[in-house]
Image: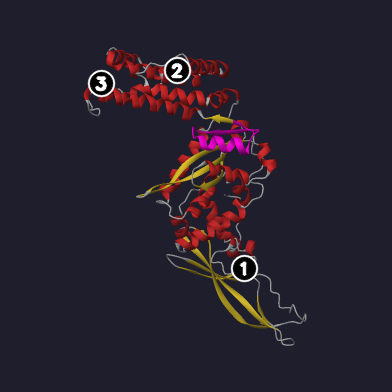
Amino acid sequence: MINATFATPDLTTFCRLDELGLEAIGQHLSSGRAVIECRLAEVDPWCRGCGGEATPRGTIARRLAHEPFGHRPTTLLLRVRRFRCSPCGRFWQEDTRRAAEPRAKLTRTAARWALSALVVDHLTIARVAAGLGVSWHTANDAVLTEGRRRLIDDPGRFDGVRVLGVDEHVWRHTRAGDKYVTVIIDLTPIRHDTGPTRLLDMVEGRSKLVFKTWLAARPQDWRDGVEVVAMDGFTGFKTAATEELPKATAVMDPFHVVRLAGEALDVCRRRIQNDIFGRRGRKNDPLYKARRLLVTGEKLLTERHWLRLELLFADDKHAPVEATWGVYQQMITAYRTPNRKVGKQLMEALIDNFTVGIPAGLAEVRKLAATLKKRRADILAFFDLPGSSNGPTEAINGRLEHLRGSALGFRNLTNYITRSLLETGGFRPALHAQMR
């Protein structure tokens, strides 16, 4: 700092008023707020009608919330000059659209700051409103409007999509039941290793019609460019993708395939528990004590775990659980095999074994086998198409859950969709570039 050059304080530059075409002419600082009095830097007194020079007729005050500096909200007290043209009798006032939208309560800089605070810094609307010194609704309306204008309404947002992910998501829990939306994710960056996944859109409801209608609304050349659709086991998504994206390959996500096997194992364990004791499991019951151990992958089992499993399966009454556990472990092994070709062979062998015949005592395995046979092509397609996992879609769902928690829930679906797109729409690089 010994060679630093200091200049006279310049409030206009410090508060970035020059970007708005304003200049500071005064200030009033208090413990809770900073008020900067300003006016337009350039005066234009010429009449647009006759071209004559007009006469100043006083000013009107306009208060605008501005980007905060320090711990205090900053408010601009903008003095807008009024003019009157004597020859033609016209009245007008200075054009302030460079500083703020007509009837807006925030400057353009403040709207940019609020959007960046929400998307980049993950602040809540309440914290953004406190930083600007405005009401919650004022901050929320400004952020959503700015977000749609700068990010969501970008015509190139859907460009380059080659891999889609689709899943359902609970956006609100009510006494009458959960309310669902269908989330559509762009998985292309994961497949091409160019960045994180992003939320493309969110549609109310969860059905074949919802997804089919959304796909039908996209241009034909865009639909022709989609190569892969990753999804869960819901048949509606599969049918909609087949009808609207006939050239795309459907992939049933490993997460959901393994979850089906895990659910079958858990149902079998609870059924055998009830058959033996005539009640639900208790903490000292062998099957109940092993409920977490049973769904642990083989490679994660220690010697102590194997001893516990041997004791558990030594009881002939637990034979159905052991058989279902074996199917579950074979499926995990197939997916965890580093060589995808070998993994595919293991999965094919597992599905083919179901055709031999399943004992009557394995009702859960029988139900699982029916699903695996029906979706055989979709399950095996995963091994041929790297980067087609729907796992990142579940990660997006997790971030949406965090968004709902930080906002203490949403009641308005339109606001929730907009906030979700801003939170997980992959806008951070674009927004950083626009903030420069």
User: Mark 2 or mark 1, which is nearer the start of the sequence?
Assistant: 1
Looking at the rendered structure, the secondary structure element under dot 3 is helix
Q: Compared to 206, does 336 lie above or below? A: above
Q: CA distance from mark 3 to mark 2?
A: 23 Å
* Mark number displayed over residue 286: 3
Q: Residues within 10 Å of mark 1 (few under 14, many from 20)?
A: many
Magenta extent: 227-249
Name above or below for residue 102 compared with residue 380: below
Residue 8, horizontal then vertical, whole percent: 60, 63
Q: Which residue is under mark 1? A: 23
Question: What x and y, as percent, mark residue 32?
Answer: 43, 65
Q: Which residue is mark 2?
A: 330
| Amino acid tagged 1 | Glu
Examine the image and state in which quarter residue 18 appears: bottom right
Whether the residues at callouts 3 and 2 have beta carbons within 8 Å, the answer is: no
Q: Amino acid at mark 3?
A: Pro
* Circle on res. 48: none
Asked if residue 212 lies in the magenta stretch, the reply is no
Among the two numbered marks 3 and 1 on one chain, the one whose residue lies closer to the N terminus: 1
Q: Residue at x 70, y 41 (%)?
A: 221
Q: Amino acid at mark 2?
A: Gln
Mark 1 in CB contact with mark 2 (< 8 angstroms): no
Local secondary structure at mark 2: helix
Q: Does the image show residue 352?
A: yes
Q: Residue at x 46, y 13 (%)?
A: 356
The colour scheme is: secondary structure
Closest to the observer: 327 or 207? 207
Instruction: Please say whether residue 289 is visible from this viewpoint.
Output: no
Q: Residue at x 53, y 52 (%)?
A: 418
